[in-house]
Image (cartoon, rainbow, N blue to C red):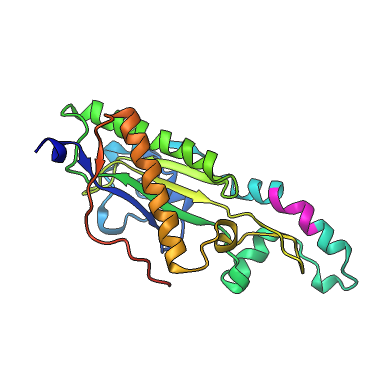
Amino acid sequence: MADEMYARSLSFSSNMTNVSFRHDERTPKDEGKIKNYGNHIQWEKTARNEVLIKNRVRQIYHEKFDDAVAEYNAKQKRNDRKIKSMYSYAIKHKGKGGLTPYKEFIVQVGSNTDHLDPDPEKDEQLQKQVLKDYLKSFQEKYPQLPVGHASIHVDEDNKGTHLHMVVVPVAKGYKRGVSVRPSFSKAVGTETPDKYKAFCEDNRALLLKALQKDWTPKATRKRVGTHDYIPP
């Protein structure tokens, strides 16, 4: 019974739908202005959401890809082969050659019924701190996946406190074409389903460490459902 008391499920999953930065960074003023699918947003709680990293995806593209694009363009004799913007190019050619403009992950400890503290306010703050510490450890471990957006939501019905994290994959070492490209599989080395599964498991381990740091060192992982990766 004691072991069950400190067991929590650890969710790290990829968002398979289109990313909406406006939806992720919503404020109470957005009520009625953005789509609320299924009316799941509890707008009276939206002010308690936290935007940790405001959308800086395009800035990351400039920082990480502009030099490589300029080097590539300098070698092109035909203007139609030059790349004006790696961001626009990646959006247009998404999926071709492994190009991934950006990728969103949703991270959560437990469910909406799994509390870390009986006091709702303390529980929410504790959940937020765990996710913030997880985000910090992710940034330290995966510098090739700079975070372009991160927000914590507490205002969704039937969902617990969770983190939305959008990363821009930076893959290096290409011998032909642009030497640095946005490719998630190459940046992380997840070319196969087993390698992707290992990446997800590693992130659940990071989440568990944050939970043990901020909640209790006795925290353990509760295994629920499956985390099998199905290629899109």
Asked where in the image residue 43 lies, by quadrant, the reply is top left
Relative height, residue 108 to residue 6 (above, below): below
Q: Residue at x 21, y 49 (%)?
A: 158
Q: Residue at x 44, y 44 (%)?
A: 25
Query: 114 or 79: which is nearer to us?
Result: 114
Prevailing secondary structure class for the magenta stretch in the rendered image: helix
Asked where in the image residue 26 lies, by quadrant, the reply is top left
Query: 154 or 65: which is nearer to us?
Result: 65
Please give left or right for residue 86 compared with residue 183 in the image.
right
Please give left or right for residue 103 compared with residue 73 in the image.
left
Query: 124 or 203: which is nearer to us?
Result: 203
Q: Residue at x 27, y 37 (%)?
A: 44
Image quarter hosting the N terminus = top left
Q: Give residue 168's position: percent from left, percent from top.
A: 57, 53
Relative height, residue 123 to residue 56 (above, below): above
- Name, please, the residue furthest toward the right: 77
Q: Give residue 2's position: percent from left, percent from top.
A: 12, 35
**Is 65 contained in the magenta span?**
yes
Image quarter hosting the C terminus = bottom left
In this picture, which residue range is highlighted in magenta?
Answer: 64-69
Q: Give residue 75's position: percent from left, percent from top.
A: 88, 66
Count of all numbered marks drawn on residues in the image: 0
**Is 161 contained in the magenta span?**
no
